[in-house]
Image (cartoon, helix red, strand yellow):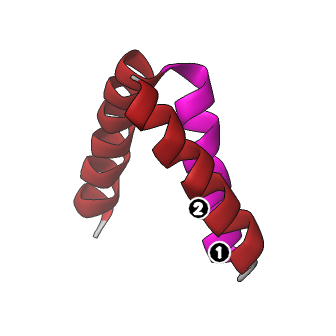
């Protein structure tokens, strides 16, 4: 169980660094808002952040 948690933590750290390198700080913040909106069951926040994220990705 502990090994699984450690591996998940390391994986999340590596994924976070990869995403931040490719998307920049705005992309990371938008992904964070999507996650928070889903976790808090706020559909408007999650959908709004997802739309802005999609627009940002089409411009890249």
Closer to the camera, 2 or 45?
45
Residue holding disc 1: 39
Question: Would you place residue 11 above or below residue 47 in this image?
Answer: above
- Residues in magenta, as a range: 24-39
Q: Position of residue 50 (x, y in %)?
A: 56, 56
Number of on-image labels: 2
Q: Quadrant of residue 44?
A: bottom right
Q: Position of residue 26 (x, y in %)?
A: 62, 27
Residue found at x 27% / y 43%: 11
The quadrant in which the C terminus is found is top left
Question: Would you place residue 16 above or below residue 12 in this image?
Answer: above
Disc 1, disc 2: CB below 8 Å?
Answer: yes
Per the image, label 1 sits on a secondary structure element best described as helix
Q: Is residue 25 magenta?
A: yes
23 displayed left or right of 3 = right
Closer to the camera, 41 or 45?
45
Q: Position of residue 38 (x, y in %)?
A: 62, 74
Closer to the camera, 60 or 1?
60
Q: Position of residue 55 (x, y in %)?
A: 51, 41
Closer to the camera, 38 or 1?
38
The quadrant in which the N terminus is found is bottom left
Q: Quadrant of residue 47?
A: bottom right
Per the image, label 2 sits on a secondary structure element best described as helix
Residue 8's label in the rendered image is none
Q: Quadrant of residue 12?
A: top left
Residue, far bottom: 41
Question: Would you place residue 40 above or below residue 31 in this image?
Answer: below
């Amino acid at each position: 169980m502990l090994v699984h948690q450690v591996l998940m933590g390391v994986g999340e750290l590596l994924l976070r660094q990869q995403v931040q390198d490719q998307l920049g700080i705005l992309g990371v913040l938008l992904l964070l808002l999507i996650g928070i909106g889903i976790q808090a069951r706020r559909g408007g926040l999650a959908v709004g952040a997802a739309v802005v994220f999609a627009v940002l990705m089409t411009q890249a």
